[in-house]
Amino acid sequence: TMALYSTPGTNNQTVCVNTPITLIRYSTTVADGANITGLPSGVTGTWAANYVSITGTPTISGVFTYTVTLTGGCGTAISTGIISVEPPPSTPLTISGVASQSASYSGQVYSISAVTFATTYTWTVPSGWTITSGDGTVSITVTTGAVGDNGDITVTAGSTCGVSTASILAVTVSDIAPGSVGSSQTICSSSSPAAFTEITAPSGGTGSFTYQWQKQPGCTGSWSDIAGATASTYEFTLNLIQNTCFRRMVSSGASAPTNVITVTIVSQPTAPTVATKSPN
């Protein structure tokens, strides 16, 4: 009777592409020959002296189910196994995050999508910058450097099968500050529209600047934007009860809201009721 016995623990293997596999050996009895099919390119199987040996260096990645079939006058004996061949991770896709930053700005997040086969990620940031959390993962949190600490944020994907080439995002640190938004204002609730107009130009630095008008959290009622949310003059209509609210202007990448302006909403007084009194 023919038989086919695999060496324990070796018939299924996971290996890296272009890396030699560990010998897979099957012992045989009373066989006239063996046929081995389904092996990855670069890997071969041989039969001699009652042993089937599978060796080689896979040159392509994938999952390969191979079959070893013994042949002889008494029939056949079949055994199967799986060889999983993994490539090194591919280059990560685009790094997401703000490219133009302000100095010493904490809590900034840069991230990528997960890369197939990667088990770890290695990040670098420009000199003067600090990775505060997330190194080794798909997302890091950083604190930016001083003005002029420009450079590249890079990330590679790695596994036991190798390290990818780097994905790169060029970043800059500038010192531009918002201009003045003028003094606080008191506005009647019936006024419409209202606007902030006393705004000077941004100053300093060489980077870009963006106006970002925002309502302070905790303000009741609503603002209705008319125009200028990203321009130097912001115009809005009111739908508020008597309250004190804030709109603020910040630069792109500013470390904290700046140039806060207080807008006090004052309701119109109620018309008085005239009482009449008959003479005594």
Image: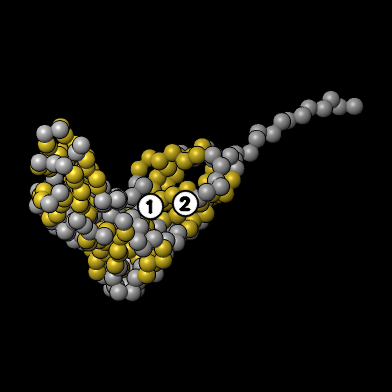
Please tell me whether residue 177 is drawn above or below residue 24 in the rendered image: below
Residue type for callout 2:
Arg
In terms of image quadrants, where is residue 240? Answer: top right
Distance Cα–Cα, label 1 vs label 2: 10 Å
For label 2, the residue is 247
Residue farthest top in this picture: 278
Q: Is residue 124 left or right of residue 267?
A: left
Q: How many marks?
A: 2
Quadrant occupied by the N terminus: top left
Q: Which residue shows up at 21% across the image and 57% down it?
A: 22
In-front residue for pair 181/21: 21
Circle 2: is it few (<14), some (14-19), or many (20+) Cα within 10 Å? many
Give percent across and percent down for residue 43: 11, 51
Mark 1 closeness class: few <14, some 14–19, many ≥20 residues within 10 Å: some
Residue 266 visible? The answer is no
Left or right: residue 165 compared with residue 280: left
Residue 92 x/y as whole percent: 23, 54
Q: Where does the C terminus fall, quadrant-wise? A: top right
Residue 158 versus residue 190 in the image, above or below: below
Q: Which residue is mark 1?
A: 212
Which picture quadrant has residue 254? Answer: bottom left
- Closer to us: 89 or 37: 37
Check disc 2 and report its element: helix, strand or loop. Answer: strand
Q: Which mark is residue 56?
A: none
| Residue at image location 24% in from the left, 47% down from the top | 6
User: Viewed as shown, does residue 239 lie left or right of 154?
Assistant: right
Judged from the image, the secondary structure of the residue bearing numbered disc 1 is loop
Question: Residue type at mark 1?
Answer: Gln
Question: Residue 73 at what x, y percent from top left?
Answer: 11, 34
Q: Is label 1 in contact with label 2 (beta carbons under 8 Å)?
A: no
Q: Is residue 276 left or right of residue 32?
A: right
